[in-house]
Structures are given as structure tokens and as C-alpha cells.
Amino acid sequence: MLKIPYGRQEITEEDIQAVIKTLKSDYLTQGPVVAEFEKQFAKYVDAKYAVAVSNGTTALHIAALALGTKPGSRVITTPITFAATANSIVYCGGEPIFSDIDPDTLCLDINKVRTLLESKPAGTFDGIIPVSFAGYPVDMEAFRRLADEHGLWLIEDACHAPGASFIDSKGKKHFTGNGKFADLTIFSFHPVKHITSGEGGMVTTNDPELYEKLLMLRSHGITKDPQRLNENHGGWYYEMQEMGYNYRLSDISCALGLSQLSRGRKGIEKRRAIAVKYKNAFKNTSVKTIDVPFGIGHAYHLYVIQVEDRLGLYNYLKELGIFAQIHYVPVHTMPYYQQRGWQKGDMPKAEAYYEKCLSLPMFPTLTTREQNQIIKHVKNYFHEEVSNYSSEGWKQKNIA
């Protein structure tokens, strides 16, 4: 039986040889390959600086720390994201404040955020973390203006969107993470993402002070820079100047990431071609897809549809070897966040989206045959009698 996951990494012979070359080198961690990966990734997104870290969650954590998040900080973010986005604020002792999504983009609704900000006294909030969900690039120019109006910092969670782009109000193209609008942007190199280093993450910025802060935070708060030392006992001397973490990424991982990055643009092109085929296939059907306006360079980490009887379709596809996925259970409905005072009903747009969303397989090596099978079976579900897989039929079968 054909088995198709929702995401799949591609490891080429070039990737393997890049890792082998590093394994045979003098450095396995914090060597020249880390620096080269950072340099090339910064170039890829058109940013001045990039700092490689151990994963996307640690990227979020040190980004929040670098911007001064502390106990009492209140940071606005979306409920439609992986839990790490909100958790990174809690790690710092702060409080994530959820605001609802725009159903047209599935990203944080800037109008909802504006209303929230205007409903509270100045100084209530410290920052905003929009998420470029599924690869749809958030309009960071608009969020920058809003953040500046209220004296807030801005982190973009772009784990889904390396290579995404949008056109600003002056007609200029901006890549996600280029540092023109967000103070910091974070990325993930998990195996299902656009490029992988096994695990890994990156923070990009155009701010030299934030860059230096990030370098210290990822390595125990330690510096050997003679210009920054309080004392200097010799060439061996170092100082721990603040609390930091071991969030470093190895040369081995960066060798894989660097090799993968070399074909990043081609991967985006393939994802977009797959998305066009899905979009055309589901025209004039009950399957809802996202419309992407002119000027938006969607990165298509995910291809999300919305359907009635989502559970039935999920089970039907699974039985056929097509492993769709759900992105995401709204974070504010998680038991942990309900213990912090959030409850179902707080974010109606996000919750309505969750009831119908399904991520179909999306990765550059998805074959035409595989995609044709996926499309055929999704259409079949809504045109044939498949009561054994419907929500009610599935519940009855499993109760029995």
C-alpha cells in the first residue's frame, strides 16, 4: 500500500558527503562550518546577522531573553502555532497573551491585536510574536508600525517560512527574516521543515547589539572578547557576564544545513507547484483552500485545507496510507494554558478553524503519482458513501 506522510525530509548524496567531510575535519562543534552556515543563511534571507542554535524553541527562548522578557512581561501571540511560541515567554517568566487569527491568512489578525492594545493602558504589553503560519508571510511592515505606535518589540516566528516574501507599501520585495521590520526572526531546521540540520534553529537580525547578546546567551553568557572583558588575565581568559545556556549547534549539523540551504530556492519552487495543483484540483468543491494575493510569496511548509467532517476524512486517508496532520490544536485550549486562565471560547476564529483544518502531504519530493492519489481520495470521500470513516461511524466502530 502507498504510504505518504504529511512531510518528508530529502537527504541527498551531497548532504551525506558534506557531513562526512566535517566528521573528518578538526572541528565537530563551534567551528568554521557553523560560521559559514550563519553567513549563508543571513545572505539567503537578506539579513545582516544570523545566529545558529540547537532548535527552533531555543531560538525563540534566547530571542525573547535578548529583548528583555522577564517576570511580568506580557507578550501577544497567536493561538494557531506550535506550543513553543507561547512557551518561550513562559520560560522567561512572562505571560503570553493570545489574540485571534485572520481566517483569510490563518495568521495573527493585526486588527484584533490593535483592538487589544487600545483596550489596555499604555505599558501593559512588551512585545508581539506574529507567526508566518504554514509559510504565509505575515505583513511585518504593518506589525512594525503598530509595534512602534505602542513602544513594543517584535519577534517573527518564521519556522514555517524560510524563503517566503512579501511586497511592502512601496513595492519592494522583502524576504521573511531580513531584519527590516522584526527586531528578531526565528527559524527551525526540524526534519519536516524546508531545510534540515537534523535539529537546529536560527535567529536573524540587523541589530548589532542584539546579535552580540544572542551570541552570549547561546553559550552560557560567556565571552572571550577582549573589548568586553572586565579583566584580562591572558589569552585563555573568559568571563561569564550573565546567565546563558548551552544552545549551540554543532558543525556536523551545520554541514547538513549548509548543504540543504544550497537547494532552498528549488525546494520552494517545487512546493509552490504542488500547491497550485492542489488549489486547481479543489476548485468548485466543498474543500476550502487559502487564497494567496498577488505579492505574497508563500513558502508552503504546509498545505492546509478546511473541510466538514475533518475526523472522517483524516481516518479515511489514514486507512489508505495517506497520513495527513492537524496544525494546530489551539494553544490556549491546552490544559496547561487553561490552568493559566484561558478557556475554550476565548478565540472563536482559531477554534472554528481548528474544527475543520487538515494538512495534506506537502514536501518537494512528493511525486505526481502520490499527489494524484491524494487528490483523488479527498474528492472520493465527499462523493462516495464512506460512512465507516465519518465522524459518527468512526466513533461507533471504536466504541464497539
Image (tube, helix red, strand yellow):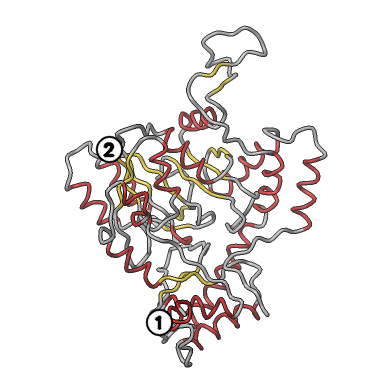
Q: In the figure, residue 349 lies in which quadrant?
A: bottom left
* Residue at the right extreme of this rendering: 24
Residue 151 — which label?
2
Q: Is residue 186 above or below residue 360?
A: above
The N terminus sits in image quarter? bottom right
Which is in the foreground here, disc 1 or disc 2?
A: 1
x, y percentage for residue 312? Answer: 45, 79
* Residue at the front extreme of this rendering: 400
x, y percentage for residue 24? Answer: 83, 39
Front in this rendered view, residue 181 or 347: 347
- How packed is label 1: few (under 14 Cα within 10 Å), some, or many (20 or more)? few
| Amino acid type, callout 2 | Gly
Front in this rendered view, residue 298 or 224: 224
| Amino acid type, callout 1 | Glu
Q: Which comes sooner in the sequence, label 1 or label 2? A: 2
Front in this rendered view, residue 277 or 366: 366
Q: Is residue 330 left or right of residue 9?
A: left
Write down the residue under mark 1. Answer: 392
Residue 65 — which label?
none
Q: Is residue 169 above or below residue 24?
A: below
Residue 170 shows in the view: no
Q: In the figure, residue 106 lies in which quadrant?
A: bottom left
Which SS class for mark 2?
loop
Q: Is residue 382 above or below residue 73?
A: below
Front in this rendered view, residue 172 or 204: 204
Q: Is residue 242 above or below residue 399?
A: above
x, y percentage for residue 120? Answer: 18, 44
Q: In the figure, residue 308 lies in which quadrant?
A: bottom left
Residue drawn 29% across the image and 41% down it = 148
Which SS class for mark 1?
helix
Residue 91 shows in the view: yes
